[in-house]
Image (cartoon, grey):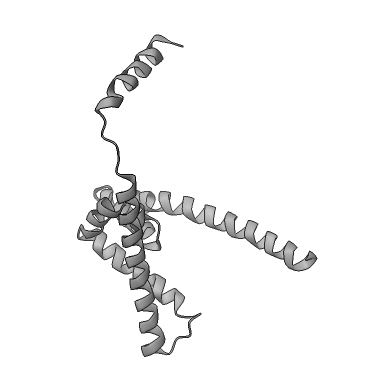
Amino acid sequence: MTSNQKLKDNYQENIKPFQPKPPYVINCIKAFLVGGLICTIGQLIQNFYITFFDFTEKTAGNPTAATLVLISAILTGIGIYDRIGQFAGAGSAVPITGFANSMTSAALEHKSEGVVLGIATNMFKLAGNVIVFGVVAAYIVGIIRYVFKTFF
């Protein structure tokens, strides 16, 4: 162990008693309630599309997701979604609105660098990772489904 590592470990041990314990239960409740509220709003939007635009339950999913992304981007742009995220933590980060918030935040943060090199480049750094993971996960799930349908 190097002397720098020993100092770092010693520092970590010394500050542990002074660090506040995170309120895990309260944080979980907040995340559950806010995430549930976001999903409830999504269900209301889907019901709106089904009722007033004659979508089926299957076809109402895409406009519902697009509407949630738009609402999230607008709330991020005016600074409200960040406050929701600070309050709810993972409850606001896990739904599709959290992804829209991340992309919009990246775009706003780098807008001074220009449209292409600032906004687009930094916004799609995050989106690229998510899209690649989604495509790979969908491919793996598709293979598993195909194997189970074919052989079982």
Q: How many marks?
A: 0
Q: Position of residue 131 (x, y in %)?
A: 50, 56
In this rendered view, identify the residue nearer to me: 17 or 112. 17
Quarter location, residue 63? bottom left
Q: Residue at x 28, y 23 (%)?
A: 15
Q: Residue at x 68, y 64 (%)?
A: 145
In this rendered view, identify the residue nearer to me: 110 or 73. 73
Q: Position of residue 95 (x, y in %)?
A: 40, 61
In this rendered view, identify the residue nearer to me: 141 or 109. 141
Instruction: Mark yes or no: residue 75 visible.
Output: yes
Q: Residue at x 29, y 54 (%)?
A: 88
User: Where 51 sits versus 116, above or below?
Assistant: below
Q: Position of residue 106 (x, y in %)?
A: 32, 51
Quarter location, residue 51? bottom left
Q: Position of residue 112 (x, y in %)?
A: 24, 49
User: Where 61 sits versus 98, above or below?
Assistant: below
In this rendered view, identify the residue nearer to me: 63 or 121. 63
User: Where 68 sits versus 93, above or below?
Assistant: below
